[in-house]
């Protein structure tokens, strides 16, 4: 049987270019990362990634990234809804400001946040004056009679503290959620919402049963992208932590090892972050497929 000609020829050639490009830019560098870390052996890798400083950096990175990603899901949904559903003066300016973290160097964002929220900053000085304090969960580990490994520690500072790290990560990851959800909101018709209202559904029922089910896949994708981006963020956080003991994040530990010419240990720490991000994205893709199959 004769095959019908394709509308756009060259599938084999284009696939070859695609695989070659991805191999040179993505696959080979990532494989080199694991190969470099393997030079110190499994015991060396385990000793590096389980050292107290590195574990503390992982906890800070994971905790702050999760809080920032969850917060941006709600904030990003609100921003995307306003931009996608309403017309108002200055809408184009607000829409452009959403993309500002993409164009702005993250180090500049870190300097600005540090200046604003430090003890002498405009906001930080006022928060200190009113006696602002907030709790933050910290991991204390199992054993020693501890049945629950998390405990709340009270902080008064924003900069040089976990809240400052979270704010910096929220700043750099907000566009990922907004730009993922906004096209879905713009393409959503209002017919189903009007039909639900005509059948007696109130606003809460319309949101939970009509609007959110259409947005869940995009929200999950935005969360995954924001979390993966926050997990590897370095530029904005380095200024707001100020190398304060106990406030280091995982990328700081990587840079610290590179500055000490301990490349194998830096590769091992980075490989753990890579595996965490890959597993998260894989889980998100599986969930999206199940959501799409269930609709």
Image (tube, grey):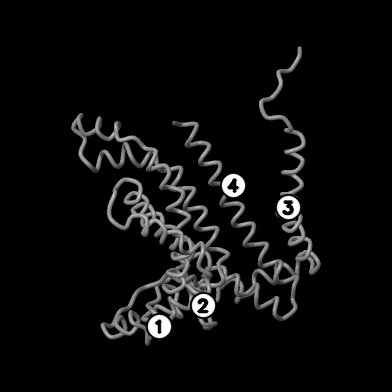
Residue 238 in the image, given as x and y percentages of width and height:
54, 77
| Precedes in sequence: disc 2 or disc 1 | 1
| Mark 2 to mark 3 CA distance (whole Å) | 32 Å
Residue at the (41%, 72%) spot, across then down? 163
| Mark 1 to mark 3 CA distance (whole Å) | 41 Å
Residue projecting furthest to the right: 39
SS type, badge 4: helix
* 49, above or below 24, in the image: below
Of 136 and 73, nearer the camera is 73
Residue at the (51%, 77%) spot, across then down? 247
Discs 2, 3 touching: Cβ within 8 Å: no
Residue underneath mark 2: 247
SS type, badge 2: loop
Residue at the (76%, 53%) spot, across then down? 24
| Precedes in sequence: disc 4 or disc 2 | 2
Q: Which numbered marker is on residue 282?
A: 4
| Mark 4 to mark 3 CA distance (whole Å) | 16 Å
Residue 120 in the image, given as x and y percentages of width and height:
37, 87
Q: Quadrant of residue 133?
A: bottom left
In the rendered view of the protein, which quadrant contains the C terminus? Answer: top left
Residue at the (42%, 69%) spot, across then down? 167
| Precedes in sequence: disc 2 or disc 3 | 3
Residue 114 in the image, given as x and y percentages of width and height:
44, 79
Q: Residues within 10 Å of mark 3 (few under 14, many from 20)?
A: some
Residue underneath mark 3: 27
Q: Residues within 10 Å of mark 1 (few under 14, many from 20)?
A: many
| Precedes in sequence: disc 4 or disc 1 | 1
Discs 4, 3 touching: Cβ within 8 Å: no
Q: Residues within 10 Å of mark 4 (few under 14, many from 20)?
A: few
SS type, badge 3: helix
Residue underneath mark 1: 118
């Amino acid at each position: 049987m004769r095959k019908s000609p394709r509308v756009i020829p060259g599938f084999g050639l284009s696939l070859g270019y695609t695989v070659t490009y991805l191999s040179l830019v993505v696959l080979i560098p990532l494989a080199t990362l694991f190969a470099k870390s393997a030079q110190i052996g499994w015991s060396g890798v385990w000793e590096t990634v389980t050292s107290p400083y590195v574990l503390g950096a992982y906890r800070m990175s994971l905790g702050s990234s999760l809080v920032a990603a969850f917060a941006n899901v709600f904030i990003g949904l609100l921003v995307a809804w306003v931009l996608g559903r309403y017309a108002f003066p200055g809408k184009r300016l607000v829409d452009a400001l959403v993309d500002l973290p993409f164009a702005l160097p993250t180090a500049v964002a870190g300097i600005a946040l540090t200046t604003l929220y430090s003890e002498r900053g405009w906001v930080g000085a006022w928060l200190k004056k009113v006696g602002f304090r907030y709790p933050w969960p910290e991991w204390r580990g199992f054993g020693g009679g501890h049945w629950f490994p998390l405990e709340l520690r009270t902080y008064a500072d924003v900069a040089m503290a976990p809240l400052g790290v979270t704010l910096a990560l929220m700043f750099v990851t907000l566009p990922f959620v907004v730009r993922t959800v906004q096209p879905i909101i713009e393409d959503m018709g209002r017919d189903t919402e009007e039909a639900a209202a005509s059948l007696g559904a109130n606003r809460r029922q319309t949101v939970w049963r009509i609007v959110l089910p259409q947005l869940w896949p995009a929200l999950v994708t935005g969360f995954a992208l924001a979390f993966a981006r926050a997990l590897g963020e370095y530029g904005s956080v380095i200024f707001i932590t100020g190398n304060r003991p106990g406030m280091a994040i995982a990328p700081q530990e990587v840079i610290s090892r590179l500055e000490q010419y301990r490349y194998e240990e830096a590769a091992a720490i980075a490989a753990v972050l890579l595996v965490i991000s890959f597993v998260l994205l894989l889980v998100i893709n599986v969930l999206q497929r199940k959501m799409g199959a269930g609709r």
